[in-house]
Amino acid sequence: MNKKVIRQPFLRVELTPPGDKSIAHRAVILNSFAGGKAHITHFCGGADCLSTIRCIRALGVKVNRSSAFPDVVDVWGVGHNGLREPENVLDAGNSGTTTRLLAGLLSGQAFLSVLTGDASLRSRPMGRVIKPLRLMGADVQGRCGGQYAPLVIKGGPIHGISYSLPEPSAQVKSALILAGLFASGQTSIIEPAPTRDHTERMLEHMGAPLKRQGSKVTVSRPTTPLRPLSLKVPGDISAAAYWLVAGAIHPDARVKISDCGVNPTRTGIVDIMRAMGAKIVVQSKQTVGGEPVADIIVGPGPLEGVELEGDVIVRAIDEVPVLAVAACFARGKTTIRSAGELRVKETDRITQTAHELSKMGARIDELPDGMVIHGVGRLKGAVVDSHGDHRLAMSLAVAGLVATGVTIIKGAEAASISYPGFWDDLEGSIRH
């Protein structure tokens, strides 16, 4: 599917973004082995989260999502020892989160599982999660010595370990926490930099034996069933990021994002845009289901180039493509480092972001772990390609809103992976 985006004279956005994808995945997975029913609202209906539902159902868990209310999901947890061997291969689609978290969960189950996905998923590295699981005694096999899916997991007794993550990864951390809940002894994970902590927050509310001390998370097998956790999923700040950037670079914009998650491990996009000079106000803060939520208001203003690396990039890793769009309109140059993980996402996001934006007149130099974006002050419409990457598709749409002429985005349907209503929201924002 191709989409046409035309430069708009003004931009008016007031919306709640779709439910946070990371939290939605975890709500289904963690409640699957709790001791009762969980009611989840504002669920993200993107393809990735639906892959998680499909896999959890195949493990014998009743998960109800009605066609009348697709953002409402009920999960009937089967208890700590209630998951059953799937009758077929578990298909995670395009979802790396589903694959890595389930690899941890299934390692401690007393049955055989096979995890696979689409061609993109099967090309993404799995070794960084398989290595520590094997140290716990898990029998996990995969292509190229366990580097790539399909993964064959022969579940059985596993034991706790103390493991220092060689690089920040919330998915690997969460996989080891899940495995630790089914392992003998304690499992400790030490992070080199803070990553999103949704798994820890949810498990604490569910009564899991989990402790956090600085950069270390320690977990052990529960002695009583976990409490089911019903929650309203906060709006996804990764989805909100496209509107935040659009509001900051469009000359006549008014953007308000309501009920958005502002977990401090995820608000790198806000901190970066503020550092660049964007006019951002965060208000009406509250806590919902253990997660901080707020309204975010942004308006246009002159932006300055910045140098970004380290923890702030870890907290904004998914937003780097749209940050590159913002940097095109900042004075001077913006340097992004510590983002090497982007080379092994749905596509090589560093190369493809630089390549596609260059078609629109951007000047971007690639770095091994990032890029240097030169502020050119303007972009021009062009025919660009998402390469099947949802974040690139939406970033190019933001670029098209402020580019002269017409922008045609090939593969625009990729946005549905994380934000099914993106194109409808975009059309609504320019019809006011």
Image (cartoon, rainbow, N blue to C red):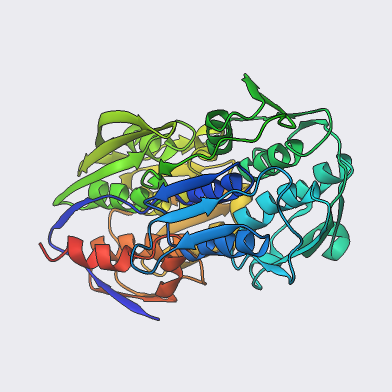
> In the displayed structure, does residue 308 sit left or right of residue 93?
left
Q: Is residue 38 above or below residue 290?
A: below
Q: Is residue 194 above or below residue 92?
A: above
Residue 414 position in % (x across, y down):
46, 70
Task: Kindly tell me whether residue 375 is visible in this rendering.
Answer: no
Q: How many numbered marks have been drawn onto this rendered protein structure?
A: 0
Give the farthest residue toward the top: 213
Residue 390 position in % (x across, y down):
46, 64
Q: Residue at x 69, y 41 (%)?
A: 178
Q: Quadrant of the C terminus?
A: bottom left
Residue closer to the observer: 301 or 377: 301
Residue 291 position in % (x across, y down):
42, 33
Q: Is residue 361 above or below residue 129?
A: below
> In the displayed structure, does residue 241 sit left or right of residue 368?
left
Please tell me in which quadrant of the rendered image residue 170 appears.
Answer: top right
Q: Quadrant of the N terminus?
A: bottom left
Q: Residue at x 39, y 56 (%)?
A: 72
Please tell me in which quadrant of the rendered image residue 90 appears.
Answer: bottom right
Residue 163 position in % (x across, y down):
79, 32
Residue closer to the observer: 69 or 432: 69
Q: Residue at x 36, y 51 (%)?
A: 42
Residue closer to the observer: 92 or 57: 57
Give the farthest residue toward the bottom: 1
Task: Kindly tell me whether residue 99 is visible in this rendering.
Answer: yes
